[in-house]
Image (cartoon, helix red, strand yellow):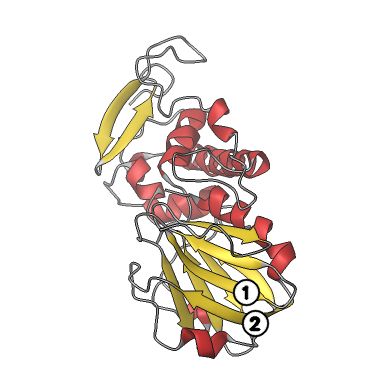
Amino acid sequence: MPELPEVETTRRGIQPYIEGQSISKIVVRHRGLRWPIIDGLEALLENQTVHKVERRAKYLQLRCDKGTLLIHLGMSGRLRVLDDDDNVGKHDHVDIYFANGHVLRFTDPRRFGAILWTEDDCEQHALIAHLGPEPLSDSFDGDYLYQRARGRSTAIKTFIMNGEVVVGVGNIYANEALFLAGIHPAKAAGKISKAKMAALATCIKQVLEKALAAGGTTLRDFRKSDGKPGYFAQELHVYGRQDQPCLCCEQPITSIRQAQRATYFCKRCQPK
C-alpha cells in the first residue's frame, strides 16, 4: 500500500503539471471504487481550475473553484501525468484532461482507492476531521506522543500506526522508527518514558524525511507519477529482514504478527 512518503511523492510529481490549470473534461470508465464515483462528476468539474494540489494524511486534495476533489490511492492506486490518452489499460479508471494538454490518469487494479468530491470545508470531511497531526509538523513531538499514550496498554507499534494519534506512520516506517529508537514494538505505549517518546518522535520524522528524499519505498504496486520507482527500500534496517543479521549487532531479526501486520525487530537492540 502506498504510504505517506509515496503519496507525498505523487503529490510533488503531479503538482507542476496540473496546479493552476483548467479541467477540460473527465472520462470515468469505472465508478465502482471503494466508494462509487458520483454521477455527474464529469459535468461538475468541467472548466474548473485546480488552484492547489495538497495532501492531508494519505488523501490528495485538488482544490478547485467550487470545492475539493479528494483522491485516495487505496491498496494499489497510482496517478500519472500523461501527454495523451493512448494505451488505455483495463485498470485505468479515470482520466482528467487539462487545457494545457496533460492528462491525469488514475489507475487502480484492486479498485480500493477513492475519488470523492466535496463542496464543504475539506478539513471537516468525515474521512479527515478525526485525524491526528502530520508527523513532520511542529505539532507532532515527544511531548505530544507521551501525553496521548498515558494510561494506554496498546502496543506502541499499533499506537503510532493509529491515524487518530498521528497520520502516515505506515507499517514499514513504524518498524524502522521503533528500531532506531530502540523500542520493542510490543511494549505498552503507556509504559514508555518521556525521553524514549521524544526519541521515537524524532526517529519517525527522520525515517519519513529520508523516505521522502528517496522518493518513497518501492513496493510491488507503487511507482512514482513519472513511472520510476523509489529507492528507500534499499536502506531498511529491519522490515522484511526476518532471520537476517541485525545491521547493528548481528542478532537475527525476529518477525511476529501484530494487528494482522508483520512486525520486524531486533531482540538485542529493542529489549522489552
* Residue at 36% over, 52% down: 150
Q: Residue furthest top?
A: 250
Q: From the viewer's side, name the closer residue of 10 and 242.
A: 10
Q: CA distance from mark 1 to mark 2?
A: 6 Å
Q: From the viewer's side, name the closer residue of 24 and 207.
A: 24
Say if 255 sits above or below 168 in the image.
above
Tell me the kind of residue under disc 1: Tyr
Number of marks: 2
Regarding mark 1 in the picture, which secondary structure is present there?
strand
Q: Which mark is residue 97?
A: 1
In contact (CB < 8 Å): disc 1 and disc 2: yes
Q: Quadrant of residue 108?
A: bottom left
45 on left or right of 184: right
Residue 54 visible in the snapshot: yes
Q: Position of residue 78 (x, y in %)?
A: 51, 55
Q: Residues within 10 Å of mark 1 (few under 14, many from 20)?
A: many
* Residue at 51% over, 76% down: 27
Q: Position of residue 46 (x, y in %)?
A: 59, 87
Q: Quadrant of the C terminus?
A: top left
Q: From the viewer's side, name the closer residue of 44 and 175.
A: 44
* Residue at 45% over, 15% down: 246
